[in-house]
Amino acid sequence: MEIQPLISIYHSPDADDMLMFWALKQELVSAGNYCFQWGIEDTQTLNQRALSGQGDIIAVSAALLRGIRDRYEMMRVGASVGRNYGPALVALKPLQITELQDAKIAVPGEHTTAALILNKALHIHGIYRFQTITVPIVPFTGVYEALESKRVDAALLIHEGQFSYQEHGLHEVLNLGTWWHQATKLPIPLGVNAIRKKLPEYVKDELTDILRNSMEYGLNNLDQALPELMRWNTERGSSCNTEKALREYISRYVNADSLDLKDDVIEALYNLLT
């Protein structure tokens, strides 16, 4: 009996990643000749895992691609792209970005795309003295507690946090996706899937097709997937816990850009990483 190759896949607990891999996990699409081992971790942990070379396929921040290029290459499927929207920099009170000199700012991880673009935005606005403090997005309440306790002056929200900060009385200082679009006229590539370079080319091609099939099935059968996504989000305390909010979030980050990278996304990646 032929032994099926075991492929390890690591992704975030956020609804976009969960939907992308949902059909494959539920055996609703073919796994081909492969077996899969799954891991679910926060963005910062995923980036650290990729830097250590752990995982065959791993969801990472687009900003990390340069740092892992010796071991991984980017897949053309699974990207989360913001088109004139993206991570939100928020504060307890209304602030202008020019007021953030010497500020302490919570970020979801030092290697995240959001943190990289925040640095670019602050520098363009003449803000060079600031301190970033990593506050993981799990649990979601952590960043709100950091703001309320005055441990930080502002916080950078990614994933579902972008949709709920107003419920906590917070004010947007800057939407990085909008800023990036105005500055570059390009979308903002936030997260991508990376695949281990040393895998044979035919294996990488087959895995790309399998993941694309999973994503297409999830998008075409969202009503079927929603109950499980809702249950998962509720159990982990996600603020994106209504069907309306979940549908909006998914429409933003699981779409045609996730099925195949567009030319303007490639251009944006080049702009981001140079």
Image (cartoon, rainbow, N blue to C red):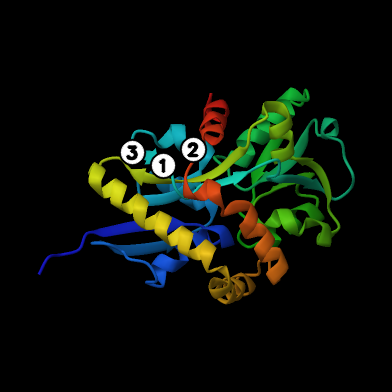
Quick check: can you spot residue 129?
no
Gap between marks 1 and 3, in whole Å?
A: 9 Å
Say which of 150 and 227 sits in front.
227
Q: Closest to the observer: 238 or 134?
A: 238
Q: Are marks 1 and 3 in contact (CB under 8 Å)?
A: no
Residue topped by disc 1: 51
The residue under the point 37% across, 38% down is 73
Which residue type does callout 1 highlight? Answer: Leu
Q: Amino acid at mark 3?
A: Arg
Residue located beneath label 2 in the image:
64
Which marked residue is nearer to the observer: mark 1 or mark 3? 3
Q: Secondary structure at mark 1?
A: helix
State the residue at coordinates (68%, 29%). 185
Distance (Cα) linking label 2 and label 1: 9 Å
Q: Are marks 2 and 1 in contact (CB under 8 Å)?
A: yes
Q: Is residue 11 visible?
A: yes
Q: Residue at x 71, y 30 (%)?
A: 121
Q: Residue extending furthest right?
A: 94
Residue carrying label 3: 71
Badge 2 crowding class, 10 Å Cα cut-off, few under 14, some 14 to 19, many 20 or more, is: many
Residue 114, given in percent of the width and then of the height, sits at: 63, 41
**For residue 103, side relative to residue 39 (left or right):** right
Residue 179, label in figure: none
Question: Mark 2: which amino acid?
Answer: Leu
Q: Position of residue 146 (x, y in %)?
A: 74, 54
